[in-house]
Structure formats: C-alpha cells, structure tokens
Image: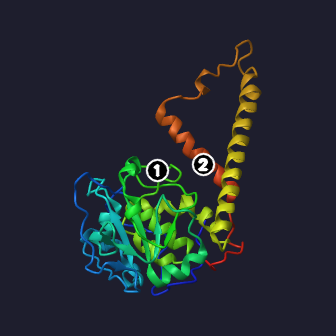
Amino acid sequence: MGKPAKAKNQSGPSRGRGRGRGGRGGGGGFGRGRGIRSGPPPEELGNGIPLSIVDDDEDDTEDERDLKDIHIAVPVAMWDFEHCDPKRCSGKKLARHGLITSMRVGQRFRGVVLTPKGKKPIAPCDDEVVQMSGLAVVECSWARLDEVPFGKIKSPHERLLPFLIACNPVNYGKPWRLNCVEALAAGFYITGHDDWAELLLSKFSWADSFWALNGDLIKRYRTCKTSEEVSEMQETIQREMEEAREERRRQMLEYSEGDLLRANPNHVGDEWDDTALAPDNSDSEGERHDVEDLISGMAATTVHDSDPVSTGR
C-alpha cells in the first residue's frame, strides 16, 4: 500500500519510507550513578530554534539522495538515560547525525514529549505545539522504566503514543515497544510531518518495515483531531484486531476438525495422518504466529487511499 500524498514540510521531494545503512534500534538508558550527557547551554529547549541536520556518517551517503535537502525545522530532543549499547541505540545514532539533541534531567522542553507517563495520546491537534516548539522522547529501556525519574522530566505537553507495533530488531512485532526513532517518527507522522519522519527513519536499514506495519494504523489516527478521538480510535482498532484474531482461530479450528479429518481418497483404507500438520509449540514459532496474527488482524483496520485523512496525506 502506498503512502498518502504529503501535505506539509515539502522542503524537498520524499523518497518514500525511510531507508538507511547500518545501525540498530534499541532502548536508551539510565545507569545508576552515571551522568546524563550534557545538553545545550540554555536551561530550556523548544523556543523555535531549528536544529541543524548534519550527515557525518559516510556509510549512509549512498541512501541520502533527495532526503539531504530535507531539514527538520523544529527542535528534536531526548533525555538519554544510557541504558543501551551505544552501538545499538537509535537515539545515539540520530545524535551522531546531528538529528537530535540530548538534554539533562531537570531541563525543560516546551514542545511535545512522548513518554510512558503521559496522560493522553498524541493527536493531529498537537501539530501546533510541534511546529512551535518541537518533539522529544525519553530514551530508556522498557525493562528499566522504574529507574527513570519521570518526575524530573519537565514538559507541559506530555503525550503517549497510541497503539503501534515495533519494527526494530530488538522488539520486532511487539505492540507498544517502539524505540526512540520509531517513537519520533510516529509522532511526526501523526502530526502530519511525513518528510521529517522519513528523514529520521532513513538512518536505519530495518526501518522500511515501519510503515508496512503501522501505515494503516497511522492513517486511521490521522482521521482524528483530538487526543480523545485518538483514544477512541485506538480502542476500536484493538477491538477489531481481537475480533479478526478470534475469527481466524475459529476458522482454523473448523478446518482442523472438518477437512483435515477426512480420509484421503487416494489412499483408501488409510487414515488421514494429521500429525505433520500439528502446530509447532516452540517459542520461536509461537512468537512468529503472534506477529502474523497481529498483521492479519490489521487487514481489518485498513484505511484505503481514497478514505479522507485529516492531514491530507
């Protein structure tokens, strides 16, 4: 399914879903007693000062093409708690490219902050704040959330991400478990800044699958206006996915109890041997089927290109 046409930030032609070379996504982190990387001198970010875009990684030049003409015209920032391997941290890779700024704990950010402690999901109506003051994330490990001093992360616009599926190598196929770059891209997509989202994703070779997994969901969220409407849409999507999953299981059960038990007419007298068709209960197979169930269920939530989308994409 192709993406809808862009409506904002067309400073340069887009080349489609993000591509890149090298780099892996992972959580950020907060180490006990370890210092947070210093942010810029001002105590506050988000005053409309654009962050420069620098491509200093020669491994990515092959895939830059027209994206090198795109500039994110708002602050992009993170509180980095040093939880992850620097070589696999998506936030640190964005920092190496000059696409994100690290902030100190206690430093205030005036834009939208994507955090697990938000009270409501990001929505298209947050675009005004994003354009004025930018977008930030909390870069930490999902396994170590209890170590993060969320009370010291200051923003008047804390937001959750709605239901989305991770495509990073660490948590591929897991609902909610987006890493730093996926969260930022989702925030920009939902508020209508497609080029900015694609520029961030372009630094990661695995990021092609982000839109494949989440494009239909994002389109539906963009038919909403407020956080309340996004919450309602999220509940509808999850309900539809669960119904689709149950229907798929019901059909499989009917098939296994019906057609698979019939005798094979080509081998009269032999009973149908369905042991080869028995499900593999290994962990890897189970996880793969869970992902397939999720993606299969998403087919019921598809928004077609002809459907109205509030951001015009």
Q: Residue at x 67, y 71 (%)?
A: 224
Q: Secondary structure at mark 2?
A: helix
Q: Name the N-terminal-most of marks 2 and 1.
A: 1
Q: Quadrant of the C terminus?
A: bottom right
List x then y, in percent, for residue 19: 41, 67
**Depth check, front residue: 132 or 277:** 132
Query: Of the residues shown, which amino acid type is indicated by label 1?
Result: Tyr
**Dot 1: few (<14), some (14–19), or many (≥20) neighbours within 10 Å?**
some
List x then y, in percent, for residue 52: 32, 83
Left or right: 285 in relation to 257 = left
Residue 5 visible, this orientation: yes
Query: Of the residues shown, which amino acid type is indicated by label 2?
Result: Leu
List x then y, in percent, for residue 125: 60, 77
Q: Quadrant of the N terminus?
A: bottom right
Question: Circle 2 sits on which residue?
Answer: 294
**Given the current orientation, which residue lies at the most extreme front position?**
151
Please, is residue 299 above or below residue 75 in the view?
above
List x then y, in percent, for residue 103: 31, 70
**Depth check, front residue: 46 or 87:** 46
| Inter-mark Cα distance, 2 to 1 | 12 Å
Please, is residue 293 above or below residue 33 in the view?
above
- Residue 172's tag is 1
Q: Residue at x 35, y 51 (%)?
A: 147
For the image, the number of numbered tags is: 2
**Dot 2: few (<14), some (14–19), or many (≥20) neighbours within 10 Å?**
many
**Depth check, front residue: 144 or 306:** 144
Asked if marks 2 and 1 touch (Cβ < 8 Å), the reply is no
**Given the current orientation, which residue lies at the most extreme top position?**
269
Q: Residue at x 47, y 76 (%)?
A: 15
Quarter occupied by residue 191? bottom right
